[in-house]
Image: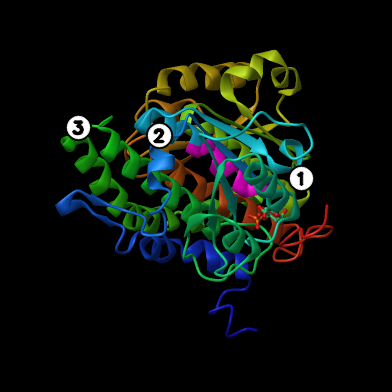
Amino acid sequence: EAIEKGGYDHFMMKEIMEQPKSVSDCLRGRVISEKNHVKLGGIFNHFDDLLNAKRIIIAACGTSWHAGLVAEYIFEELARIPVEVEYASEFRYRNPIIGKGDVLIAISQSGETADTLAAMSLAESKGAVVLGVCNVVGSSIARNSHEGAYTHAGPEIGVASTKAFTAQLTVLTTMALMLAKEKGTLTEAQLHDLLVELENIPSKIEKVLKTNDAVREMSALYKDAKNFLYLGRGFNFPVALEGALKLKEISYIHAEGYPAAEMKHGPIALIDEEMPVVVIATRDSSYDKVVSNLQEVKARSGRVIAVVTEGDALIPGMVDHVIEVPDTHEVLMPMISCIPLQLLSYHIAVMRGCNVDQPRNLAKSVTVE
Ligand code: G6P
């Protein structure tokens, strides 16, 4: 097992560190920016159904659901197709309105999640096209979808999903760009820029991983917190949810993710000097708004850890800690901004003596209801 962990103490750390490779494996042959080439070979017979979908419904659970939520923002922004994101467990039991002309995308690392499988068969029985985005080759979800795309992240052993999440984002972004190209919702130049940026993601992740030591040091200051709040807006809102989930899963600290602007409708009441608040505040179209949310937290003595874009001159003077990440296009930022949050949850959990790879009460794949 020590050999399988590749020199790391835990599979989770190994898998976090593998992300530059897993993302580039996922892009291989699918994206070639020089030629403005973007294609998922697994979606062929049903590509037109996807392109002309009245609506895309994404069904998933857990971390895969968070990838779906990022995808909603990306698909609508780039390809202008309406998207709804559903918890598979809710969708399957609520007599949903779905039929011909709709496409359901099931996202699943394991490809075995019972609720996601059930959502797929319901959608199929009502006439929708069903696509799968899975990591495990030959899994039930892969076999039961009409077509799909693998994430090619390699085996993920740690219960808390890390590299599968960034690979899901990679596939879903590729899918959105493939549709945008065909639909003409992006100019050739915009498409080109995004493809170049997508190809640069692995090296940017590599750079974020260099913050590991700094994140470890910071984790020591927060390991005894009772609660954590994670805030983000726009493309980074689902990243806030995912950051909070990672911390809950492996450190057993209560954490909530929230869209930063919603804070004033509830969580702001919880903020005091005992409450660490992780704010994803990279430079994008919601930057100014996030900065004011961050000030609202500081005004109530919350302790703020901010994930910022390299070279940010404003935020470091306002908060307790910053973690810098390289700049990229805002639609791609979740692939980068999620990384420091993975590291933070990992180190806090290790310092608390938790079983990082196999947290209590959780399973890698939930094959029963
Ligand atoms: C379990 C795992 C999570 C995972 C979720 C969905 O809860 O512990 O890490 O995100 O199931 O799993 P799936 O395999 O469908 O992505």
Quadrant for the N terminus in the image: bottom right
Q: How many labels, in total?
A: 3
Residue at image mark 2: 52
Please report whichever mark, 1 or 2, sits nearer to the chain's N-terminal start: 2
Q: Residues within 10 Å of mark 2 (few under 14, many from 20)?
A: some
How far apart are the two marked residues, 3 and 1, measured between alpha carbons? Answer: 45 Å
In-image side of 143 versus 188 (left or right): right
Residue 25, percent across and down?
A: 38, 66
| Residue at screen point 45% across, 61% down | 19
Please report whichever mark, 2 or 3, sits nearer to the chain's N-terminal start: 2
SS assignment at label 3: loop
| Residue at screen point 82% across, 57% down | 368
How far apart are the two marked residues, 2 and 3, measured between alpha carbons? Answer: 19 Å
Residue 309, percent across and down?
A: 37, 37
| Residue at screen point 72% across, 55% down | 250
* Residue 333 in sight in this render: no
Determine whether 93 is above or below 213 in the image: above
Residue at image mark 1: 253
Q: 210 or 249: which is nearer to us?
A: 249
Is the CB atom of the residue marked by disc 2 within 8 angstroms of ligand 1's nearest atom?
Answer: no
